[in-house]
Amino acid sequence: MHAGLKSASAVFAVLGVLAGTGVLTRGAPASAPTAALVTGIATTEAVAEPFTPGEQQVVRLLPPGYSAGSCMRATNPFPAAIASLDCTDNLQSETPDYARFTLYDNVDLLTADFYATAESMVVSPCPGGNASPGSWDYGSSPGRAGGKIVCGSIEDRADLAWTRDAQLLLATVNGGGSLNDLYRWWLRYGGS
């Protein structure tokens, strides 16, 4: 078909749809069909895309209490990240209100973003007098390095960030009762 005929056909098809919905009908309120069309478009756009393979890997690394259904693709992730999920619904009642889990493809990028996270916080010592920022070992294997940890607050909310270097994962949690509460949660679920 000639390009001009294709364009003309497309225009007539659009006009037919508009006439069928009443947009081109005299005396019809212009806002009613437009609102219906906008509603239809907004509903279509609200459907979440499936997780990418990198995001699926993050889901497999989530601490107990978090599930794929409580997480969504992170807004404003670190540019060097492979995948990043924001999670807001933890099934454990005494746990963080918000968490972000971010995956990397090398430890240098992970470390750089960990320190960028620490710089965005008002840093304080971790409970028990532990260094912040500092390093942590796996509780079940003392001496086996797990990664880095920093404690503090952001906008007067308790905040804790840590890395799991072997898994190339950066995690940040905030909210809950206090920094002591977050740290106790981290000892049970995050640093293991």
Image (cartoon, helix red, strand yellow):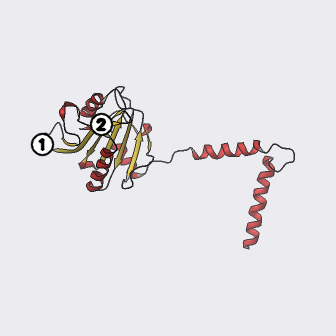
Instruction: Determine whether the residue tagged by mark 2 lies in a helix, strand or loop.
Output: strand
Read off the residue under disc 2. 152
For this orientation, the residue located farthest to the left is: 143
| Quarter of the image with the C terminus in it | top left
Could you tell me which residue is drawn at 81 percent across and 51 percent down? Answer: 19
Residue 36 at x, y = what percent? 71, 42
- Pick the residue in front: 68 or 129: 129
- Pick the residue in front: 59 or 83: 83
Could you tell me which residue is drawn at 26 percent across and 45 percent down? Answer: 164
Q: Name which quarter of the figure residue 141 lies in.
A: top left
Q: Do the residues labelled 2 and 1 touch (CB within 8 Å)?
A: no
Residue 56 at x, y = what percent? 39, 47
Q: Residues within 10 Å of mark 2 (few under 14, many from 20)?
A: many
Q: Residues within 10 Å of mark 1 (few under 14, many from 20)?
A: few
Q: Please tell me whether residue 36 is drawn above or below residue 4 in the rendered image.
A: above
Q: Please tell me whether residue 149 is drawn above or below residue 129 in the rendered image.
A: below
